[in-house]
Image (spheres, rainbow, N blue to C red):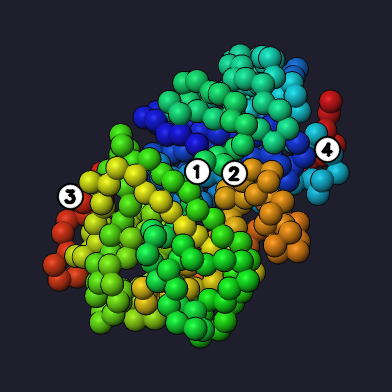
Amino acid sequence: MGFGNMPGYISEFSPVGDTSQEFIEIALPEGTDPSGYSIQIYDGSGNFLYSYPLGTPTNTMAGHDVYVVDSTTPGYSDGGNDPTGRLYPDDAVALVDGDGNVLQFLSYLGNTVTATNGDASGQTSTETGSPGAGESLQSDDGGSTYYVQSSPNSGSIPACYAPGTLIATPGGHKPVETLRAGDLVLTAEGHARPVRWVWSGDQPLEGAEPHQKPILIRAGTFGVNLPSRDLIVSGQHRIAVGSHGQLEDVFEMPCFVPAKALCTLPGIRFMNGKKSMKWHHFLCDDHSIALANGLASETLLLAPMVVGRMSKSQHAEISAALQRRVTALTCDHPALPCLTVGETRDRLKTVEIPGRTAIGNTCKSAAHRPH
């Protein structure tokens, strides 16, 4: 997945396979109201077929709110009845804004489509490439060009922990990089949960935008021993708030928020000097609240976009570890409600927190298919 400067565009899509394998990822500038935006599908003759709302953002990255239309989108899944899925080889996909303007009209597999009705009427699609099964088409330049991604976002860095992060276990604290499948970790509620799968990966940071850098949470930022020592996490890693002694006076209900949304608070900042990072994460049977350096945080969440980016080998590994087939239709439910970066910042604006800097100074950085 890549992000550019266009007002809104399809950042990645996988049109090959059944509806459990297909997805369309959309990037809108952070804070854009998605009301009225839609993904529209046209058949090879130019007929308008389906329209799907963007729903709620699944992530905020590189200054863009990210939305995913896939099998979890109401009306999209056909239950696997059609092996071709919603997107047929000669179809085209349009991204339409709230005023009915067509921002993009894309096709694939060597085909072009001229729409005969719908919002894209009279427009001819741009052919973007020819992905195979298990592949996607990705743009790293804001939707200007696309290339085939052989393992959809398998190189993406999920929300995770830096080496040396101490994870609470029944036998004491263990560095996250030493966890192995079968080890037990303690949840914030004191329950032991077995680790089912571990992940590690490298993230080059030279040339990365400031808001893509790791987040440092200083020891004691949220209170005594919260965290007990400096904690380094990726920007999208979720921190529990409104519970466990963490910002309970700010958030009335327990929820998860992206770490980078908290960078307006004293003691939390982007690590702009980092040139690269090694990341680690771990998966339990379900999404849980773990303790990282004493701070309530998260285990790996198998959200639809995360599952959609995994390679075939990772799908197989996790399915075997969990003893169930892992698809976008069988994703985990988050242990707490998850707020976006924008929602978190809006909440922080409503309260006075001593020592907080101004937000702008630190954080900008269906019917039968008629084929």
Residue 18 position, x and y percent, is 77, 40
Front: mark 4 or 1: 1
Residue at coordinates 55% horizontally, 34% vertically from top-left?
12
- Against 115, residue 365 (above or below) is below
Q: Amino acid at mark 4?
A: Pro
Which of the image's four quarters has the C terminus?
Answer: top right
Residue 67 position, x and y percent, is 52, 44
Q: Amino acid at mark 2?
A: Arg
**Distance of label 3 from label 1 (alpha carbons):** 28 Å
Marked residue nearer the N-terminal end (3 or 1): 1
Q: Secondary structure at mark 4?
A: loop
Packing grade of label 1 (10 A; few <14, some 14-19, many >=20) is: some
Q: Amino acid at mark 1?
A: Ser
Residue at coordinates 72% horizontally, 51% vertically from top-left?
316
Q: Are marks 2 and 1 in contact (CB under 8 Å)?
A: yes
Could you say which disc has been placed on residue 83 in the image?
Answer: 4
Question: Badge 2 is on which residue?
Answer: 309
Q: Are marks 4 and 3 in contact (CB under 8 Å)?
A: no
Marked residue nearer the N-terminal end (4 or 1): 4
Marked residue nearer the N-terminal end (4 or 3): 4
Between 347 and 316, the residue placed more toward the observer is 316
**Distance of label 2 from label 1 (alpha carbons):** 8 Å
Residue at coordinates 41% horizontally, 44% vertically from top-left?
203
Question: Badge 3 is on which residue?
Answer: 361
Between 321 and 14, the residue placed more toward the observer is 321
Between 93 and 148, the residue placed more toward the observer is 148
Residue at coordinates 16% horizontally, 59% vertically from top-left?
357
Front: mark 3 or 2: 2
Q: Are marks 3 and 2 in contact (CB under 8 Å)?
A: no
Question: Badge 1 is on which residue?
Answer: 156
Q: Secondary structure at mark 3?
A: helix
